Amino acid sequence: MQMTGAEIVVACLQEQGVDTVFGYPGGTILNVYDALYQQDKIKHYLTAHEQGAAHAADGYARATGKVGVCLATSGPGATNLVTGIATAYMDSIPVVAITCNVNLPLLGKDTFQEVDIAGITMPITKHGYIVKDVRILADTIRKAFRIARSGRPGPVLIDITKDVTADTCEYEPQEPERYLPAAKRYTEQDLEKAAEMIRTAKKPFIYVGGGAVLSGAKEELRRFASLLDAPVCDTLMGKGAFDGHDPHYTGMIGMHGTKASNFGVCECDLLVALGARFDDRVTGNAKKFASGARILHIDIDAAEINKNVKVEHSVVGDLKEVLMDLNARLTQASHPEWNDHIAQLKKEYPLTYDASKLTCPYIIRKLDELTNGAAILTTEVGQHQMWAAQFYAFSEPRTLLTSGGLGTMGYGLGACIGAKVARPDKVVVNIAGDGCFRMNLTELATASRYNIPIIQIVIDNHVLGMVRQWQTLYYGKRYSQTVLRDKVDFCKTAEGLGCKAIRVTTKEELEPALKEALAAEGPVVLDCWIDDDDKVFPMVSPGAALSEAFDASDLGGK
């Protein structure tokens, strides 16, 4: 059948099973928006800003494992997607960003609102396309979805000239390609070497990254940890892949990881890294990381092997498949003395906080209690992000959605909207510091426009908390541009954007406010005031070894 390029875009999205897109219209993409208007299978959410659309598509993808989709016009519309695309790229999230550009004869002539968005995003996408011929448009969109979700997932950009969206050609529908994991690249010898390392270990430790979430390896990981009888730590991106209530679980590893995890990794004789990339926030001083251990690295991306930390052996492949094959080779191990030692570390170095006043850990614990640990949490970036990771007991994958690699302030609210749209059955809460919240708080208008019942908790300490913490510890308390005590009233702002707002200044006010928010049928903002000098502990100083983790008691409470 003959279709315009714009109609082909919509038909291909439907073909790929897309039911939700986020975006903002403009001149060059008008034909696509007109085609969207004339169908009823895809729901479009108009965000307040294109960055919000990218983050919403990202949150949708993280919450479901599907490909998230965002749309923007040329020039500033396209460039406003860049931070969201980079966020998805750093965390391996499948997103397809569709932009439209000026007409083909006008490309390269500094035309109004023209920008080379494919060139700009080349370093932060798995692949980018510029479509200049309507006859290749359908196949390009299909390829983009395949690339976004295959192997190590990631974002793909499709830029389409406006005249292509108006041109016509014959369109033939196709069944969407069923995703299959890539052919196995590991051998029997790879598996046997890994199994031999595991069998001979006396003090094994498992380190779980975001790849365990992306591969859907929860059950295989649980079985693997049980067979090894080994303690398990996770990264920020790996939260929920292993049940936070399991006795083997020791908490997060790294700069703000638990002492039990950090010290345990320093003492182990085998570290098994699963779907993790040895990020600097995890390893601390890479030269001293797990220095007494043999390291076994399992990951889908061969480029990650030996990139940051040298390992003794690796298995390159889809983590779920590798663990299935590896589990079949293993027999039940037992390491009672090692596990008793780790249990003693957990007992000796528990996560603590001041229970006498309203603090972020208290808020997170109360939220965990009232939601039975079953909510989806999105976060911004900073102290509140670390407290959420530390004090909410995640038991399922895809329930902590956070910008781990890029550290994007302003990410959480858009992601929260995307996640709630994707999972209306779940309570979805965004945890934000007041500094982060200012960046994209206009997305509250998106939530109120569609009456999306999200909960926005602002951890309001009137400062840029994490930066201030570093200024306190390393910069002689010189608080350069980190104090936010101005005339902004978040409750009035939220109400002006169509949301219910509740201010919480004491512990006693928190539970009733949370219960009211949980019962609400629309978006609610809780502005929770905490002390400006509350700090996230434990902590490992930049460049230090994990064995040098410290907390307030090590500093004399200062």
Image: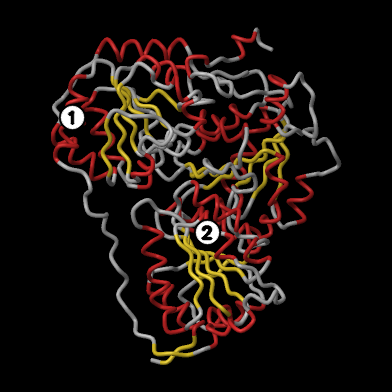
Q: Which residue in the protein does label 1 denote?
A: 195
Tally of marks: 2
Residue that badge 2 annotates:
122
Task: Report whether 374 appears left or right of 50.
Answer: left
Residue type of the residue flagged with mark 1? Ala
Q: Position of residue 434 (x, y in %)?
A: 71, 39
Up the image or down, 95 lies above or below 394; here it is below
Compare residues 228 and 388 and report the one nearer the observer: 228
Residue drawn 57% across the image and 54% down it = 84
SS category of the residue bearing label 1: helix
User: Residue furthest toward the top?
Assistant: 556
The crowding category of the residue bearing disc 1, from other C-alpha atoms within 10 Å (few below 14, some 14 to 19, many at least 20), is some
Above or below, 287 relative to 445: above
What label sits on residue 363 in the rendered view? none
* Quadrant containing the C terminus in the rendered view: top right
Distance between the alpha carbons at the discs numbered 1 and 2: 39 Å
Pick whichever, 525 or 156, lies toward us: 156
| Mark 2: few/some/many CA within 10 Å (<14, 14-19, 20+) | some
Viewer-nearest residue: 190 or 344: 190
